[in-house]
Amino acid sequence: MVEKLKSTRFAAGTGGAYAGKVNSSTSTSIDVHPGNASASWVGAALAVVAGEGQGQLARISAAVGSSYSFDPALAVPLGAESVVVIVPYVGKVLMMGACGNRLL
């Protein structure tokens, strides 16, 4: 399934959500396709749902263009096949399944 996934921005509500691979990443930042970026994702939850680093969670702390900084830093770097989701944060986010049923 990962090989067929393309980056997608879902426009439901304010800012929507994102699911897909990243253009580049460090332990504290990612860059997504500019057409899928949203400045309203500051404060959103970032979850690595497939590939290297799967199961990690962080909160988006800053956005500049299509680049996002987050905290805490990822312990396992993302790989070329890693898939992330970014979802708005409104109080609490519960990630189940790929992220091991954790609350952010």
Image (tube, rainbow, N blue to C red):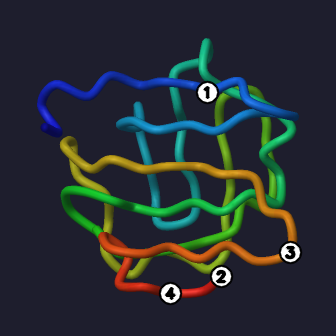
| Quarter of the figure with residue 81 | top left
**Image quadrant for the C terminus?**
bottom right
Mark 2 in CB contact with mark 4 (< 8 angstroms) = yes
Tag shown at residue 43: none
Tag shown at residue 102: 4
Q: Position of residue 27 (x, y in %)?
A: 47, 66
Mark 1 residue type: Phe
Mark 4 residue type: Arg
Q: CA distance from mark 1 to mark 3?
A: 20 Å
Within 10 Å of the Cα at label 3, are there few (<14), some (14-19), or many (20+) other Cα atoms? few
Q: CA distance from mark 4 to mark 3?
A: 14 Å
Q: What residue sits right under mark 1 in the picture?
A: 10
Tag shown at residue 104: 2
Q: CA distance from mark 2 to mark 3?
A: 9 Å
Answer with mark 2 or mark 3, whichever residue precedes in sequence: 3
Q: CA distance from mark 2 to mark 1?
A: 21 Å
Residue 62, relative to residue 24: is it above or below?
A: below
Tag shown at residue 91: 3
The residue at the point 19 percent across, 57 percent down is 51
